[in-house]
Image (spheres, grey):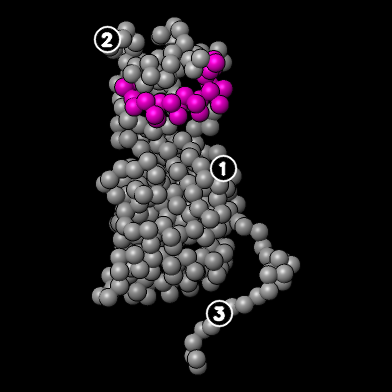
């Protein structure tokens, strides 16, 4: 047994009585302390998202335009970008503001089995409570082992970083990709085995249809309440923002459809009018009614809440609805999207 590390024991009563620090948040409701895995399809804005979160973390500003963030030492490692592109991203994201002194950038990082994990621990030891953002996992994960399974390799790719995050109170986010297959469960869209999602403390899945500005950010994890937040992409500023009280494109389309119909509609008629599948439409109208954006009667019919009657349609110009065989207006561009 000499030289080996044994288990750590503590009486349950002693653990309950122990004074432990409270969980800290890099971005409340989205990124708690620990290791987070941010996944999404290529080229939908994941890197811009970590720049927004990272700059807000370093400056003590507002993430996604709304969430107050406590300032901390922050490192962004956009490993797929050359220095010129990183500079452009910084200048664009700062929008003329002074670059935070607590923000550092790394354009190169060794793989974790080639010294990269030791560098991460050294940074964490020097900046306890700091935030680290790595883009992307493929650039830093260890090379595949000869005798290991796919699951064990995936778990090992993040387990060391997760340990370092816990040891120094860090909030670390690693960007990764989704697989090509779709699923109703966002976790199942993460590329790789369940070893990746098992090693991470928090999973974030960013989903956006390329022809739309709105996206959903699904968040789940050990220390965060499962949620789905609607974000809006501003292509002119290259920024993500939380919609808050602003209606998403899908909800705007429902309200406009009901306005044109001039009468309450059932979910099947709303789905047909928008060119959507029935089940996602049913979930969407249920959420809108709970949010007070729609009125629901006892017969399962939905109508607009007068408070939202004057909601404007997203975009520079208002689309003219097409008429389908039911006589209901149909709005293109919303087929198969989630709530």
Q: Which mark is residue 67?
A: 1
Look at 45% across and 36% down and name the residue there: 231
The magenta stretch spans which residues?
Answer: 274-298
Secondary structure found at label 1:
strand
- Mark 1 and mark 2: Cα distance apart in space: 45 Å
Examine the rendering and report whether any part of residue 205 can be seen: yes
Mark 1 or mark 3: name the one nearer the start of the chain.
3
Secondary structure found at label 2:
loop
Q: Which mark is residue 192?
A: none
Mark 1 or mark 2: name the one nearer the start of the chain.
1
- Mark 1 and mark 3: Cα distance apart in space: 40 Å
Q: Which residue is mark 3?
A: 7
Q: Which residue is mark 2?
A: 325
Q: Position of residue 130 (x, y in %)?
A: 54, 61
Extreme-bottom residue of the structure? 2
Of labels 1 and 2, the one closer to you: 2
Look at 55% across and 79% down and name the residue there: 7
In the foreground, 47 or 287: 287
Query: Is disc 1 in contact with disc 2, using a CB cutoff of under 8 Å?
Result: no
Q: Position of residue 63 (x, y in %)?
A: 52, 44
State which quadrant residue 114 falls in.
Answer: bottom left
């Amino acid at each position: 047994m000499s030289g080996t590390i044994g288990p750590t024991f503590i009486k349950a009563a002693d653990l309950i009585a122990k004074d432990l620090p409270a969980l800290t948040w890099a971005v409340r409701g989205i990124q708690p302390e620990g290791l987070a895995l941010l996944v999404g399809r290529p080229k939908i804005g994941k890197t811009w998202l970590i720049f927004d979160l990272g700059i807000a973390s370093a400056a003590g500003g507002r993430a996604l335009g709304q969430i107050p963030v406590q300032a901390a030492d922050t490192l962004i490692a956009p490993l797929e970008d050359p220095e010129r592109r990183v500079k452009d991203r910084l200048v664009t994201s700062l929008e003329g503001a002074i670059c935070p002194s607590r923000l550092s950038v790394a354009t190169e990082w060794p793989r974790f089995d080639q010294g990269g994990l030791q560098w991460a621990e050294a940074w964490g030891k020097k900046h306890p409570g700091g935030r680290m953002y790595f883009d992307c996992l493929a650039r830093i994960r260890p090379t595949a082992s000869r005798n290991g399974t796919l699951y064990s390799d995936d778990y090992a790719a993040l387990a060391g970083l997760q340990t370092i995050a816990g040891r120094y109170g860090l909030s670390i986010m690693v960007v990764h990709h989704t697989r090509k297959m779709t699923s109703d469960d966002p976790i199942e869209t993460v590329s790789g085995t369940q070893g990746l999602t098992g090693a991470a403390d928090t999973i974030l899945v960013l989903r956006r249809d390329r022809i739309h500005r709105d996206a959903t950010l699904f968040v789940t994890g050990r220390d965060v309440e499962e949620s789905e937040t609607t974000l809006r992409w501003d292509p002119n500023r290259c920024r993500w923002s939380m919609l808050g009280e602003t209606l998403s494109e899908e909800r705007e389309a429902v309200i406009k459809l009901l306005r044109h119909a001039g009468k309450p509609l059932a979910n099947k008629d709303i789905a047909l009018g928008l060119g959507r599948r029935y089940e996602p439409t049913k979930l969407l109208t249920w959420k809108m009614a709970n949010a007070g954006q729609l009125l629901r009667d006892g017969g399962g019919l939905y109508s607009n809440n007068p408070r939202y009657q004057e909601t404007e349609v997203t975009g520079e110009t208002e689309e003219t609805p097409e008429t389908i065989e039911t006589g209901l207006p149909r709005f293109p561009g919303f087929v198969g999207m989630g709530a």
